[in-house]
Image (spheres, rainbow, N blue to C red):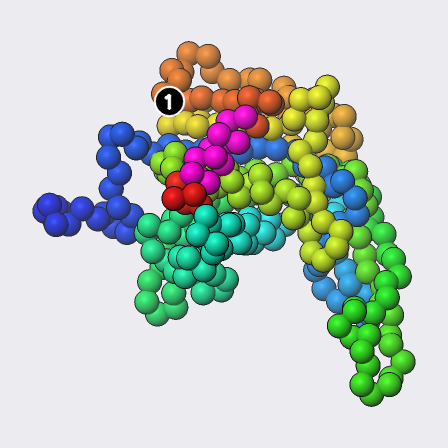
Amino acid sequence: MATKTDNDKRVTTGLPKTDENNPRFHFDIYAILEGSQELYLGHEVQVNVNMVETIELQTKDGNSIKKCYISPTKRRGIERRCLIWSPVKSGELLGDKLGCGIPKTCTKTDCPICMTYGGLDPGKSTLIGRLTHGGGVAIQELDPVEKQRAMHPSKLVNKNEETPIPFKREYNQPGIFYPVYNHVLSVTEKEFSAVAYAFLDALPRMGAGNPKGVSIAEENQIPLLVLDRYLVPGGKRPIISPSETNPETAIQEFLRLANDQNENIKETHFKRWIGNEALTKLQEYSCQFVDTYLQE
Ligand SMILES: [Zn+2]
């Protein structure tokens, strides 16, 4: 193995070394989101019908069911855009300030977006993301609803005087629960602050077109939210089986798993925040992101 010199502090991951004051941890966010109105998350267009993304699965007892879906890749894209469009004190947007956008990411190791979400500059450099997204399969087994929509405003100005063709669009029904999960691998708290900001800021912007938005579902006025910071995975993971179709059962499962943790593991190795405490902690990390990158 090659010996490292003072000039060669980089390891094979391409990531700079952190110091003792900024230790790395793993972080997980678990949440149950609720569609606060209809949602459109486009999948494919059939003859004049915009379809939403659905998923078909076989339940534990062998039934085939179809469910709506907020795909992890779509959620990731919305979160990344939230960071790119975040307002900097100087009057710029963060993406413009950093020269980091979609699809042209900057891949710099001091970019708070690429550091966690990853970046690719084709043929030049790659920064592997350390944030992964999971979940998104709806709880309720509710088929999308198809609705008639007028032409898109940009096409209403019809130079050729053709008859405008209205189209139909499918929507995820309101009130559907979507368990979602964000996992971050070996990041400092400063790096995680961008993930916390993006997770919270993306909620009202979830969906394509109008309307948009999801909320964190609540049970007895407590958000169904868990935040883990750990070196040792010391708790059961509040992940809901895609087979589950009853929202009440899903909530009880989420709470049971969230409260099942190993009390013997010291706080430096495993720390879990649940409900309002988890929300407060995510908001604190979000403030850290704003102070570090947007207000400097
Ligand atoms: Zn970047």
The answer to whether residue 63 shows anywhere in this view is no
Q: Name the side, left or right, on which 38 lies relative to 193.
A: right
Task: Please give the range of residues in magenta.
Answer: 280-291
Residue at image coords 44%, 52%: 90
Disc count in the image? 1
Q: Is residue 1 above or below residue 162?
A: above
Residue placed under numbered mark 1 in the picture: 269
161 relative to 227, above or below: below
Residue at 12% x, 50% y: name it.
7
Task: Tell me the quarter of the picture where residue 46 sits.
Answer: bottom right
* Residue 2, image x, y percentages: 12, 49
**The C terminus - image quarter:** top left
Pinpoint residue 215: horizontal percent, then vertical percent: 69, 37
Say above or below: 153 vs 265.
below
Q: Is residue 108 magenta?
A: no
Examine the image and state in which quarter residue 146 appears.
Answer: bottom right
Up-down relation of residue 255 to residue 54 (above or below): above
Q: Is residue 275 left or right of residue 95?
A: right
Amino acid type assigned to the residue bearing label 1 in the image = His
Residue closest to the eye, 118 or 22:
22
From the viewer's perspective, is 12 left or right of 207? Answer: left
SS type, badge 1:
loop
Chief secondary structure of the magenta span? helix
